[in-house]
Each structure stands twice: as C-alpha cells, then as structure tokens.
Image: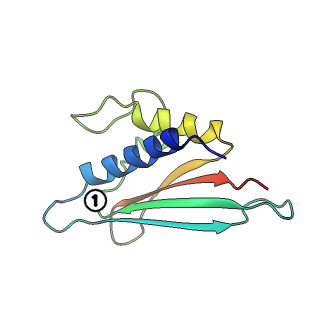
C-alpha cells in the first residue's frame, strides 16, 4: 500500500543524483531490490531498494546533514531532493540512508518500505 507517484519520485530523484555524480565515460548505476525482515517483530517484512553508483562518493562534511533542506554538493541542484525523498519514505513508514562504497568509490542509497500484512 503505497502512493506510486511519490515512490516513483523517490526512485527518480535517487537515480538522477547517481547519474549526476558518475563519470560518464565509464561510470555505472545499479539498482537492486529485496525483501527482508529488518525488525525484531516476528512476521514483519520490508522491501529494501538500493541504488549504487560508481561516482565520487558523498563528501564526509555533507554526510551528517545529507537529508536536510538545502544540502547540496552540486552546482545544479537545490538541495531539496533528498529532503523530500526522506519525507516521502518516512510518511510510508520506511527509512532512507546512504553510505559511501568501500574500496571502489561511489555511494549507495537505500530505502525501505514496509510490506502490508
């Protein structure tokens, strides 16, 4: 049970950001989904969406405030996309976070949505 338009907005924003920060000569973006139990409560399941890129990664100075209003490391963005995405995901009962990839550069953004029982 989710608002398809809003979840599509989250995916579109994360993909757009991933593409914006990769090297267009040999960069890549990967999308993966899986269902898992992230909660201790028995019988709960979440869908996990991961969008991984091979770009420059997230600046360590920006990481703590990444999902705040007007946080950007780009000349072409408003710094609202991740803030809006966070609000959409949390309104659906999910979580959103990001990590820099270990070793191979780039970053991975994750979000979860609970599966209706």
Q: Is mark 1 on a helix, strand or loop?
A: loop
Q: Where is residue 51 in the image (x, y as percent from the top left)?
A: 43, 59
| Residue name at image x 40 percent, y 62 percent | 52
| Residue name at image x 62 percent, y 44 percent | 2
Q: Position of residue 35 (x, y in %)?
A: 64, 67
- How many numbered marks, from 0 up? 1
In the picture shown, does residue 89 fall above or below 80? below
Q: Which residue is label 1 attached to?
A: 55
Front residue (pair 4, 81): 4
Q: Locate residue 61: give its quadrant.
A: top left
Coloring applied to the structure: rainbow
In the picture shown, does residue 1 fall above or below 102? above
Front residue (pair 105, 29): 29
Q: Residues within 10 Å of mark 1 (few under 14, many from 20)?
A: many
Front residue (pair 13, 96): 13
Q: Position of residue 63 (x, y in %)?
A: 45, 45
| Residue name at image x 24 percent, y 57 percent | 22
Task: Please give left or right for residue 106 compared with residue 33 in the image.
Answer: left
Q: Residue furthest left?
A: 25
Q: Where is residue 78 in the image (x, y as percent from the top left)?
A: 32, 28
* Quadrant of the frame with the C terminus: bottom right
Q: Residue furthest right?
A: 42
Q: Which residue lies furthest to the bottom in this view?
A: 103
């Amino acid at each position: 049970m989710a608002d398809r338009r809003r979840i599509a907005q989250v995916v579109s924003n994360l993909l757009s950001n991933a593409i914006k920060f990769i090297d267009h000569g040999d960069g890549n973006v990967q999308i993966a989904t899986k269902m898992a139990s992230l909660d201790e409560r028995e019988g709960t399941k979440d869908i996990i969406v991961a969008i991984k890129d091979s770009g420059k990664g997230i600046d360590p100075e920006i990481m703590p405030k990444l999902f705040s209003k007007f946080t950007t490391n780009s000349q072409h963005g408003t710094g609202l996309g991740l803030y809006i995405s966070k609000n959409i995901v949390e309104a659906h009962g999910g979580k959103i976070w990001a990590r820099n990839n270990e070793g191979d550069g780039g970053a991975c953004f994750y979000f979860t949505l609970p599966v209706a029982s």
